[in-house]
Image: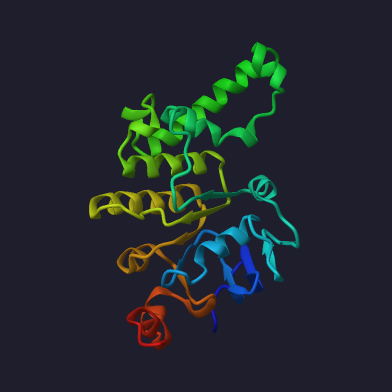
Amino acid sequence: MNTTQPLPPPLLQLEHISLSFKAVKAITNISFAVQPGEICALIGPNGAGKSSLLNVINGVYRPDEGAISYNGETLHIMQPQHAAERGIARTFQNIALFKGMTVLDNVLTGRNLHVHSSWLEQVFNLGRAPQEAVRQRKKAEEIIDFLDIQPWRNSVVGNLPYGLQKRVELGRALAAEPKLLLLDEPMAGMNAEEKQEMSRFILATQREFTTTIVLIEHDIGVVMTLSNHVVVLDYGKKIGDGKPEEVRQNPQVIAAYLGTKH
């Protein structure tokens, strides 16, 4: 008797996505699906199209061909604002924080979509604004506690070490309460200890918030430890897609990383 349970519908599905910049093909006919609650790693050599693919998913780039389905809805045209409203949050390869603001204020900016009071109510602290400010502060403080950055909550972000700034950027994304979290090289430039800490927080995010995560990472050891699913790109094409142990033994993947393919 077959007791295998069918997989739920994917949260994210890319079908035949292609993207070019003038005559340069950045992505060619990419298809894959991401299941709810999994950590999917996008890996590949520099210039493989990984960041471009994230930019397609959250609406920064519009693909030349193909379709994206998210949470059961096929999205033909999407802007970053629409992606955020649908529960897609993003961090960037280069830290994109408000460097002159405190940690708390940066995390609070991630709550913007959850603010319902008008700007007049906020300016004069009237109507819904006072209670709403308390709720947003409480949520931001919960994220700060979750990421163990309480000692720096009132520190100016630009004065913090690089690894802490990356954690604050993760906090701002989590404050939006995303269903899908896109992480573009969250551990770039980190030392081994910082990578270990960030890996711990990514796993905790998946476990405690049931957040689905798509991340770009170059450290294969980190990828194999964190991921449930790995998609490999090379020169804008998909050359591997499966569980980490399957991808690790894929001859095309080995060739791309060892430089023997080209």
Residue at 44% in and 49% down:
94
Snapshot quadrant of residue 117 = top right
Residue at 56% in and 63% down:
52
| Depth order, front residue of 190/138 | 190
User: Image height check: is 222 above or below 148?
Assistant: below
Please state the total of marks drawn on the protein image: 0
* Res 210 seen here: yes
Snapshot quadrant of residue 58 = bottom right
| Residue 67 spot, x, y in % from top left | 71, 69
Residue at 34% in and 50% down:
198
* Res 31 seen here: no
| Depth order, front residue of 223/135 | 223
Residue at the front extreme, as displayed: 23
User: Image height check: is 221 above or below 138?
Assistant: below
Q: Quick one: quadrant of the C terminus?
A: bottom left
| Residue 261 spot, x, y in % from top left | 40, 87
Snapshot quadrant of residue 123 = top right
| Depth order, front residue of 65/151 | 65
Q: In this figure, which colouring scheme has been used for the structure?
A: rainbow
Q: Quick one: quadrant of the N terminus?
A: bottom right
Tell me if 112 is positioned left or right of 141 in this view. right
| Residue 98 spot, x, y in % from top left | 48, 34
Tell me if 136 is positioned left or right of 119 in this view. left
| Depth order, front residue of 8/85 | 85
Residue at 56% in and 25% down:
135
| Residue 239 spot, x, y in % from top left | 49, 81
